[in-house]
Image (spheres, grey):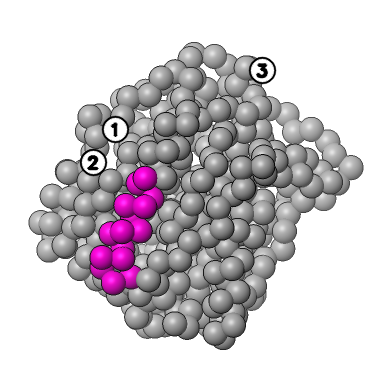
């Protein structure tokens, strides 16, 4: 089919599901630590709605030598993640969705290298991040984590097929991503989630050009011809400037500020016209005024027994609210993690059909069903839902 995806809820016809093959490690370096900086050193019961677990583990300092560099991931977690991804594919196929897959990361490819830096490489798992689908256009966004710099190249076969069918295909400017490229103000000033881990002093590079645009597709809530965009840093703002100039009058862009450190889909998702799933009522207060009149379903607080127990050496990356990251297959059907019964019951009370799917290690790999998928064909068009 022709590429066509304007919103988050209309009937899903085609989607890409990410790959976890040969996922070996995370690399603790500046871009990674900035992306996950809202993690705190311990539990913070007084701020439970923003609660993030530790990033520095075992009580060691965040910038201690033993926590810098590559942090291995146990193979059994990767194997189970691969199994769960196949379960997502099966569930979507059963719902008559055509599923595409990226190329797997080859086991022999262990590093990303540019003239300015090198980093370990990760597979194309959270494919929502580095691509934004707007109508009939594929937009590859400028990455925020060095390990993911060339990730969209593993989706080239998929993008090429849509291009051959008439899709537009655009790549936003690629950042040099030296230390000087990053805006550190959010990490150093924000109190979201309680005390954040310290960010070290940037290291000068001959390739420094100053703050650059960096931005993820998951920072955009798509509502027909309207886009709600989360802006937390200067490089997000630069990228949004680019989007506004590039899109012209095809879409209306509504900026929200510091709704989260980056991704909006960890805070709010549109399940159908007029209905939002939100992490808390506080989130609604930061949305554009026209959206505050929509019905809101507040995600229930997750239970601790919804999650596997991990050891001190395991790097836990996401909030327990990660299961809010659901995928809508139609205006009344939603894929939800089977390990989150409270959320399933809540959605069923609001007349949604819930399709339970297994996803065990979402807190280790930083994504839910919305993150792991890229919807390329939906039935909806550029409707004006905010008129």
| Residue extending farthest top | 59
* Quadrant (top left, top right, bottom left, bottom right) of the N terminus: bottom left
Mark 3 or 2, nearer chain start? 3
Position above or below: 37 against 352: above
**Residue 344 on the magenta span:** no
Where in the figure is residue 242, as x and y percent of width and height? 65, 68
Work out whether residue 249 can be spotted: no
Give the mark toward the camera: 3 or 2. Answer: 2
Extreme residue toward the bottom, this view:
166
Q: Is residue 321 left or right of residue 168?
A: left
Tell me the number on the disc at residue 339: 2
Left or right of 228 on screen, residue 171:
right
For residue 233, the mark is none
Reading the image, the residue beneath label 1 is 307
Residue 65's label in the rendered image is 3
Instruction: Find the magenta span and give its range.
Output: 83-97
User: Does residue 192 appear to the left or right of 179 in the view shown?
Assistant: left
- At a point 25% along the width and 65% down the height, the residue shown is 94
Label 3 CA crowd tier, 10 Å (few <14, some 14–19, many 20+): few
């Amino acid at each position: 089919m022709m590429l066509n995806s304007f919103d988050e809820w209309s009937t899903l016809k085609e989607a890409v599901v990410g790959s976890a093959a040969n996922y070996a490690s995370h690399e603790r370096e500046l871009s990674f630590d900035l992306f996950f900086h809202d993690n705190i050193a311990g539990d913070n019961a007084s701020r439970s709605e923003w609660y993030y677990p530790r990033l520095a583990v075992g009580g060691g300092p965040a910038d201690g030598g033993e926590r810098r560099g590559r942090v291995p991931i146990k193979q059994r977690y990767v194997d189970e993640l691969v199994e769960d991804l196949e379960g997502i594919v099966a569930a979507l196929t059963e719902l008559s969705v055509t599923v595409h897959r990226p190329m797997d990361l080859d086991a022999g490819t262990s590093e990303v290298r540019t003239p300015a830096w090198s980093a370990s490489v990760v597979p194309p798992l959270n494919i929502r991040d580095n691509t934004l689908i707007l109508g009939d256009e594929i937009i590859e966004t400028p990455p925020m984590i060095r390990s993911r710099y060339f990730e969209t190249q593993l989706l080239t076969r998929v993008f090429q097929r849509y291009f051959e069918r008439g899709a537009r295909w655009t790549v936003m400017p690629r950042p040099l991503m030296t230390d000087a490229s990053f805006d550190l103000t959010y990490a150093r000033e924000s109190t979201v989630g309680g005390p954040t881990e310290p960010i070290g002093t940037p290291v000068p590079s001959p390739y420094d050009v100053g703050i650059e645009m960096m931005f993820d597709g998951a920072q955009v809530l798509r509502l027909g011809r309207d886009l709600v965009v989360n802006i937390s840093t200067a490089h997000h703002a630069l990228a949004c400037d680019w989007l506004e100039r590039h899109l012209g009058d095809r879409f209306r862009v509504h900026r929200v500020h510091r709704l989260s450190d980056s991704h909006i889909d960890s805070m709010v998702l549109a399940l159908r016209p007029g209905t939002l799933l939100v992490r808390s009522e506080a989130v609604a207060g930061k949305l554009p005024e026209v959206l505050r009149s929509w019905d809101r379903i507040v995600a229930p607080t997750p239970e601790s027994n919804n999650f596997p127990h991990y050891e001190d050496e395991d790097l836990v990356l996401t909030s327990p609210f990660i299961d809010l990251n659901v995928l809508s297959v139609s205006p009344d059907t939603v894929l939800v993690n089977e390990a989150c019964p409270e959320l399933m019951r809540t959605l069923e009370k609001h007349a949604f059909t819930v399709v339970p799917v297994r996803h065990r290690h979402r807190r280790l790999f930083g994504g839910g069903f919305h993150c792991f998928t890229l919807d390329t064909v939906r039935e909806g068009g550029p409707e004006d839902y905010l008129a």
